[in-house]
Amino acid sequence: MDTYLGSIKSFVAELAKSIEIVEAVQMDNVHLLITHKYFIYIYLPGSVRQENSEYLASIHIDIDQVSNDSSKIIKRIRGLHGLGERVYARQTVVARVDKRNALHFLEEHHLNMAFPGKYRYGLYLKGELVSVAVFSGGRHMRDLGDAYRSFELIRFCHKGDLLVVGGLSKLIKAFVKDFNPQDIMTYADLDWTQESSLAAIGFVAIDKTIPQQFYVVNGIRKSNLLETDQNYYTIENRGSLKLKLIL
């Protein structure tokens, strides 16, 4: 427990360097940080997800994420508070990205597991990769027409707390030009959002997935357990919002 509390203390101290924490509250196995824009819940083992705040947007973070990805989380929260560097998509160049570079970028900047997908596009600012979008292969939807193909946007992120305004739209336009999909679907993590910002570029929420369970084994998050895994605890997120962009 002392290790967990030490991780939270370090996380809060680093976050407070750039974001004012209005109030910090410790509940049973849950720590709540309140800023001017968000309720930030941090969950210790054995805790359950709290209800979203009625007054501010809510962020739900587990202690294994704080311990392993503190820097990524702080940069993302800074970005959500409008504190990151802002550039515009028109300043960037879009190009395909190879598997190795895409995976390296996602591992460095995305909170979830890196997936190579089938097609990868990036935005470059003065030669530097600053945004990556990863797409699946096409799935034929015969019930919607013989030529109807649906693709998934599997991963998308910017570099650190950088915000590329219009970046995802530019990446999607390049992908659509190359593959002419009839729709693109994706998922938004409900631990981080209650209403997806993707609605601004035409995505429509069509469903919600049930909460997903994970296992934390010796501090490492897994989707499945091995017979040899011991000393683990389970966590359950808030599920995901399923969205679709009809083209």
Image (tube, rainbow, N blue to C red):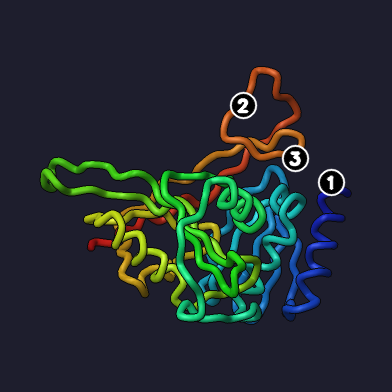
Kindly check if marks 1 and 3 are in contact, taking CB atoms under 8 A apart as contact. no
| Residue 170, quarter of the rendered image | bottom left
Q: Residue at x 32, y 61 (%)?
A: 205
Quarter of the image with the C terminus in it: bottom left
Badge 1: how crowded within 10 Å, few (<14), some, or many (20+)?
Answer: few
Mark 1 vs mark 3, CA separation in Å: 13 Å
Residue 30 in the image: x percent, y percent? 70, 56
Q: Percent x, y for residue 168?
A: 43, 68
Q: Amino acid at mark 3?
A: Gly
> What label sits on residue 225 in the rendered view?
2
- Give the labeled residue for mark 3: 219
Q: Mark 2 and mark 3 in contact? Answer it, CB < 8 Å.
A: no
In front: label 1 or label 3: 3
Label 2 or label 3, whichever comes before in sequence order? 3
Look at 62% across and 66% down and name the residue there: 159
Q: Position of residue 40 (x, y in %)?
A: 65, 66
**How far apart are the two marked residues, 1 and 2, measured between alpha carbons?**
23 Å
Secondary element type, mark 3: loop
Pair 1/2: label in front:
2
Choose between 227 and 161: the one closer to the eye: 161
Residue at numbered disc 1: 1
Quadrant of the rendered image containing residue 41: bottom right
Q: Is residue 1 above or below residue 76?
A: above
